[in-house]
Image (cartoon, coloured by chain):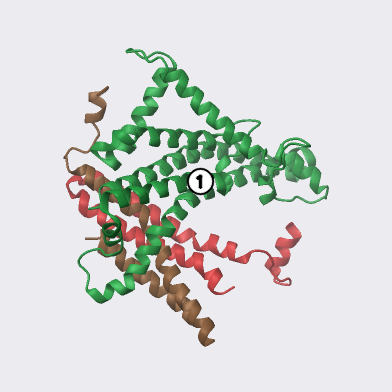
Chain colours: A green, B red, C brown
Amino acid sequence: MSARQLLAAEGGNEFQAPGTEIFEWGPLWHGAPSWLTKPTLIVALSVIIVCGFFWAAFSKPKLVPRGVQNVGEVGYLFVRDQLARPLIGKDGDKWMPFLMSTFFFILVMNLMGVVPVMQLPAPSHIAFAIVPAAVVYVLMIFLSIKEQGLVGYFRNMMFPPGLPAWLYVILSPIELLSNIILRPFTHAVRLFANMFAGHLIIAFFATVAYWFLFEKLTPLGASLGLLGFVMTIIMTAFEIFVQALQAFIFTLLAASYIGGALHPDH
Amino acid sequence: MLAEAVNVLAGDDRITGSLGAVAYGLAAIGPGIGVGIIFGQGVQAIARQPELYNTIRQNMLLGFALTEALALIGFVVPFVHP
Amino acid sequence: MVRPAMSKEGQRPDPESDADHRAFANAAWSIPSYLLSGMAVYGGLGWLLDRWLGTSALLPIGVVVGLALALYLVYHRYGR
């Protein structure tokens, strides 16, 4: 869809690789409110899908799970055994609702990048990666101050024990910047950059295939177009993997920050 | 596109575009391979000697930090020398 | 609770490994932000000094020095 639009817009005789304009979506239809764009639609759909799925899975839980409840329980066990218990500790089960909804919300938003018709991972707009990261960040600071006290938090953060006093002057700014500013930044950017680059790569190979196989079919270009076609399929499979992995990593970092706030000794 | 590539190879045209991005792409190759080697060999070492888990893990982290530093230098160089 | 077999096999055996695992995840994921922050602090300092003194060499020096300091910090925190 985006490739066809692009080629129509170019109109030239030379192959043009897709740029960042494939991420710019106007209002859905003419006269729609300006906030109602494709990414916001995708986010709203993801919310509905996640809520609907877990409503179907857990609204009437049976002792012997059947059907969709099975899937929901496997997802729950995965998040609990891989993330909550190892990274937060014994009180990890208390944080399961938060981790669970974070993981599945981001997973569904990411997977929208390979769903036909949608084909745009919502976190490829950095705003949709910043907001969950900001929620985790505020939660982390709140929990740290609650558990360790304001002074204790900054002491644990900025002054690792066992260094000569003059070195603290040099190293404490690094610690402060790393923990207060760069942590949420890298947290958001990891998700955003992976989704952005992945979508760009798929769009590039799809454009290559479309251009050389349909738009300008020549004997020499056909092999290139075929390569683009095959690479589109391979990269789509790879993207599914990366999308699931990035949702996992985002939740892992959230759990790790919460665990670090609750157990400052590590 | 081909003509541009030939021009660039022949050197009779100035290279334009975001050269910093190209430079970072090239600079990321080495650290990419390095990080892969470090974690691959680290996992192998842990699989062979699980009782040395802590030592291997720490050395893995240090090696990762050193390699990552190279990648980050590559990331900063385009800002330092625009 | 649900599947005792699954939670036992393949998991780390000793009880203190939870804290270990936590420390490892924390370390592995915060190393890049430490390095970036070292470069940002001392590179930024070098950049400001460059602007003030009219030189041009202090920014790269600051970046490398900050990177070295951040590496030392990582070594001190997680390497021993």
Disc 1 chain ID: A
- x and y percent of residue B80 in the render? 53, 73
- x and y percent of residue C21 in the render? 26, 45
- Viewed as shown, does residue A38 lie left or right of A254? right
- Viewed as shown, does residue B20 lie left or right of A154? right
- x and y percent of residue B29 in the render? 49, 59
Q: Which residue is drawn at 53% across and 27% down?
A: A49
Residue corresponding to mark 1: A131
**Residue type, numbered disc 1:** Val
Local secondary structure at mark 1: helix
| Position of C75 relative to C58 (above/below) | above
> Is residue A68 visible to the viewer in this orientation of the structure?
yes
| Position of A203 relative to A158 (above/below) | above
- x and y percent of residue B59 in the render? 26, 58
**The quarter of the displayed image where residue A235 is located:** top right
* Circle 1 Cα neighbour tier, 10 Å, few/some/many (<14 / 14–19 / ≥20): few
Q: Which residue is drawn at 49% across and 26% down?
A: A51
